[in-house]
Amino acid sequence: MDKRKDLTVALAIALLGLTIVVLGTQINLGRIRDPIGSRALPIITGALILAGGLFLAGRRLIRWKVDPAVVPAEGTSDEPDVPASTTRSLVVWALCFAYVALLEAVGFLILTPFLVAILLWIMGVRRPVRLGLLTVGAVVVIFGVFDILLGVRLPLGPLDPYIGYIG
């Protein structure tokens, strides 16, 4: 890995922190004043990000002459049998967006088993019994915890007249 990329990323992080600080100072204080104010959180957060970026950039500059221009990459490469796949991750993103778009109309109990089963299939669960048990178990646990235990009303879609509010 080229250490100039490290320096560029560190400076970009510092610039982001500075931008957050500047934008935080422009927040309207409102009519009710308090000791901390509505500006404090973004200014403190931006200052911490700025400090972190400057620290990383300074560390890279100090070690610039000691380390070679290109340092060995950290981490491990992909496993030989399970390579990373951009297509796979994009399919998962598309499925999640479709799930959110269809959830209200189709309902949690109808749509979620399909999503869970497809995601498990993408992750390599291929045995039908295991796939079915994990899918049904996940839907039952999620519905039980959120709808019944916590009282978060999940959309039931066309099943709403038949099931109604359980929790």
Image (cartoon, rainbow, N blue to C red):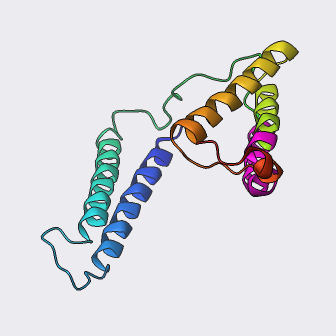
Residue 67 appears at what percent x and percent y?
39, 33
Q: Residue at x 74, y 16 (%)?
A: 80
Q: Is residue 70 left or right of residue 116?
A: left
Q: Residue at x 42, y 49 (%)?
A: 7
Q: Residue at x 58, y 42 (%)?
A: 167
Q: Which residues are magenta?
A: 86-110
The single residue placed furthest to the left in the displayed view is: 35
Observer-nearest of 39 and 128? 128
Q: Is residue 17 left or right of residue 95?
A: left
Observer-nearest of 139 and 149? 149
- Note whether residue 127 is visible: no
Observer-nearest of 153 and 121? 153
Q: Mainly helix, strand or loop, the magenta region?
A: helix
Residue 23 appears at what percent x and percent y?
35, 74
Q: Is 106 colored magenta in this rendering?
A: yes
- Image: 136 above or below 52: above
Q: Is residue 49 left or right of residue 141?
A: left
Residue 61 appears at what percent x and percent y?
33, 46
- Image: 124 above or below 147: above
Q: Is 87 colored magenta in this rendering?
A: yes
Q: Quadrant of residue 48?
A: bottom left
- Image: 118 above or below 153: above
Residue 109 appears at what percent x and percent y?
76, 40
Observer-nearest of 157 and 135? 157
Q: Quadrant of residue 101?
A: bottom right
Q: Is residue 32 left or right of residue 109?
A: left
